Image: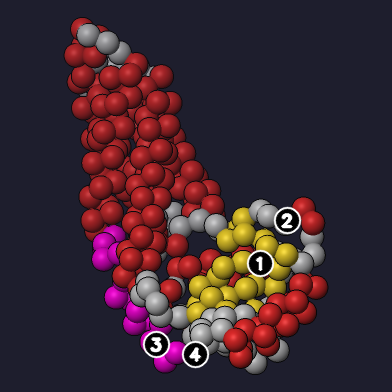
Amino acid sequence: MSFGFPGTDILGGWSGTDNGVDEKSMKAKNRLPIRNRYILIVDILLTIAAVIGAYALRLEGFLFYYYLTGAYWMIGVSILIKPIIYYLFGLYRRQWAYASTSELKLISAAVTTASAVVSLGNDFIVDCAAAGPGFVRTTLIIDWLLSLVGIWGFRLALRLISETRNTNGKNHPGIGRNVLIVGAGDAGALVVREMQKNPQIGLRPIGFLDDDPNKLHHQIHGVPVIGKIADLIMLWIIARWTRSSSPFPVRVAK
């Protein structure tokens, strides 16, 4: 059982929506409509930009143009190899709206592997004397760094855009109720995160209650820890008092 004050519920857990809204259809409607084929195209453009950027950062003036033939060969090898490596690592079978640190590790492994294979390909071309004056090997390291930043940064941008669309598309002011979460641990943080990502469920987290004094007055996902669990009794008294004296409705969830 949980007690609330005007328009507020106090919950120790949460299992979903009770307002009749089809959550799956709302998620599908507000999900960022971008297909993996477009992500592939952006990856190819980022691959080209990483190679040109690596040569531009490493070489200046005449040297840049002198080694430009090598850059063209490196672009060709990268376009042939990197998308295949990314595909094998599953980068085109993910919903990037839900990207996390595990995806960062996956991208790091994929980019590192792709860069290593590209390096071997470049060495083969040099051995065949097809790359003009050859390659500047330090550009491979710069290309790896730029590729890592570009590939991860693009997918992080997809997640941020998706979350912004979800919030703007489903947040209806005046609808729903405020909620206090009992427990500011991992489970409580997960509950708050889910509420924030899915405002259509009609629950707005406004605070945590937790007995850990180190968490008091700190914030988790922008929601403050406002008191201890023992404060539930005082909140219940306030709720019972405001039920009769406040013009706003008091919700008591069971």
251 displayed left or right of 84: right
Q: Position of residue 66 (x, y in %)?
A: 21, 11
Q: Which stretch appears magenta?
A: 19-36
Residue 130: within the magenta? Answer: no
Q: Which mark is residue 70?
A: none
Q: Which residue is mark 2?
A: 215
- Mark 1 and mark 2 lie on one chain; the one further toward the N terminus is 1
Gap in Å between the C-alphas at discs 2 and 3?
34 Å
Whether residue 57 appears in this view of the structure is yes
Q: Amino acid at mark 1?
A: Phe
Quarter-of-image position of residue 165 = bottom left
Picture colour scheme: secondary structure
Asked whether the beta carbons under mark 4 and mark 1 sit within 8 Å of each other, the answer is no
Q: Which residue is mark 1?
A: 208
Q: Which residue is mark 3?
A: 21
- Mark 2 and mark 3 lie on one chain; the one further toward the N terminus is 3
Q: Residue furthest top?
A: 62
